[in-house]
Image (cartoon, coloured by chain):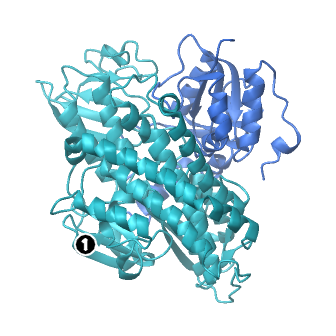
Chain colours: A blue, B cyan
Amino acid sequence: MAKKVTIASDWLAGCAGCHMSLLDMDERLVELLGAVSLHATPITDLKHPPPEGVDVGIIEGAVANSATERVVRQMRQRCRVLVAMGDCAVFGGVPTMRNAGGCQAALRRAYIESESTVGGRIPDDPELAAMAQVRPIDAVVDVDVYLPGCPPPADAIYYVLKELVEGRTPQLAGKLLDWH
Amino acid sequence: MNNVARSGAGAGLSRPLEKSMSQTITIEPVTRIEGHAKVTVRVDDAGKVEQARFHVNEFRGFEKFCEGRLFYEMPLITERICGICPVSHHLASAKACDQIVGGQIPRTAALLRELMHMGQIIQSHSMHFFELAGPDLLLGFDADPAIRNVVGLVAAAPELALKAVRLRKFGQEIIARLGERKVHPNFAVPGGVNRKLRSADRDAILAEVDTMIGSVQEGLAVMKGWMEKHSAEMATFASFPSAYMGMVGEDNALALYDGMIRIVDANGRQIEHFDGRQYLQHVAEHVEGWSYLKFPYLRKLGFPQGTYRVGPLGRLNACDRIDTPLAQRELDAFRQLGGEGLPEGSLYYHYARLIEDLYAVERVRQILEDREVMSNDIRNNAAATSHEGVGVIEAPRGTLWHHYWVDDQGRLERVNLIVATGNNNYAMSRAVEEVAKACVDGNHITEGALNRVEAAIRAYDPCLSCSTHAWGRMPLEMVVIDRGGEPIARAAR
């Protein structure tokens, strides 16, 4: 039997809905697990893709701060094929709505002006991440496969993974792009 | 332990130490929770834990960037806060919009929204028990981290795993049958819902109910077996008194879609009972500089005395009964666990979550057997309008509020959100501290001990994207700090 295809995934600025859609492969996920080996993902306890790399890296979510930028750069270094999964990773998605008004105004609204907040302040501990302009991941690294949708349907995710597992380049078209 | 790194060496992505003389352990990110966060643990010279903090390290700002949008877009925008419980945001938002267009919705619309909500409770609770928390319970807190996950679970108990997959799928398909898609559905609209139930869908869902009840009961049997073997851990692991919040219906029955908000104290005595739309009179939020997640509390008791717990444990402790027979029987058994008082251990969340899962499947049948569920009366077109609306619902992880103010054109002027997981912020910090004190030894740090700290957080099934309406990554790492504020240990896997 051929060596199992290794996969790692992570989520950046997003809602986890793409990973939920991945789980929506249901029985097909169990079937795929026969041919792939999951490394670091949000549902396993390995924290980072291994330095020796994985075959497929999957990123959900946009780049929104210094921490998420580090994560996507590391994934790019440590995977052979990088998949941008979902509209936030592919285009920036809903998170980019923050760009219009800016982060400071949003922070003030949430932590000081909010009607339910008493004695508020903007969190400023040096341990907290610095926010940045929200961008799709290909603004930071090269992407090999674009898998759009909010979220992409489980059928599309299954198609992409199946093609990659069998050594082909996925060519998304037709119904698989029609997520509405 | 392959993942503990002293002096930060080999710690993968761990941030370089600011003070390189010290030793550091990082857990980054904490896994099998939604989103990422960070824990700092302060230890004294002898290696004894003095203090622990749960930091959430991301922020989105939905409240701000939704300003100017038309209110009726909100059920579709705000479900993007969370892909695990999009239905909760979809429905809380729609309830706020109902008020803006004049209040009551037809009973059939309320039933169908509740049906969709039950689908989500089933998928979210089932996924948490089997795929996120299950590996700790079925494979062990100290199992090899390389297999301590759902894949390991599939290998160890393939039949149970397949049933778990189908149970989650059952919930997701209820959502899709009503709202066309499993994640981010399009169904609830101001004043009702946008399509009626098809009889073929009703029959297909009903046909599976008994099988799904059986699957939840298998999960309950696993949980109860685990509790018997680990009774001491159940009673002591992150166990502390608190107040509890949950929604209740008639005679204080458990309610998840609509009802009054009830709060009981640590002994089960009612201390608040109010219409959730009046939340601003009862609930306030505290901010700490070290977390993007706010700390809700009861105004009349102040912070931190007025903090409380929500979600499955909060709801079962805050209600008097459950309106479905099998879940009521489990509630009776659950009540015995606390002895004279209420069950307070954080691990009881897992049991409570499965009891709610059972209730949700039973409730699906009740709703589908209601003679009004097939009615065409699914939307009100009231002329009356209000400039303000509040929607409140019990999301899988706790009480969720959406509050909108609109101008004469229906444009949002202000938005305020209090999100389920946020209500448990203080409790999660406390749980982390209790477990860190009980399990972490600053002189001898083990992977199993760090996983227990993660498990304390995991019991609450936090959804950190939701709770900060945050975009993305919240790295959870664990830093052990000595009395002088020096980080001495950090762990990464």
- Viewer-proximal residue among B188 and A31: A31
Rendered view: B315 above or below B373:
above
Rendered view: A155 above or below B205:
above
Rendered view: B296 above or below A89:
below
Left or right of residue B41: residue B147: right
- Viewer-proximal residue among B244 and B162: B162
Left or right of residue B301: residue B466: right
Q: Is residue B186 visible?
A: no
Q: Chain of mark 1?
A: B
Which quadrant: the N terminus of chain B?
Answer: top left
Horizontal and vertical percent position of residue B181: 71, 55
- Say what amino acid the circle numbered 1 marks: Lys
Farthest residue to the right: give it: A174
- Viewer-proximal residue among A18 and B365: B365
Rendered view: B216 above or below B70:
above
> Which residue occupies 69% across, 66% down?
B203
- Answer with the quarter of the image where residue B119 lies: bottom right
Q: Residues within 10 Å of mark 1 (few under 14, many from 20)?
A: few
Horizontal and vertical percent position of residue B214: 50, 54
Q: Is residue A25 visible?
A: yes
Left or right of residue B479: residue B414: right
Q: Mark 1 sits on what residue?
A: B300
> Which residue occupies 53% across, 34% down?
B158
> Which residue occupies 21% across, 32% down?
B439
> Which residue occupies 75% across, 23% down?
A164
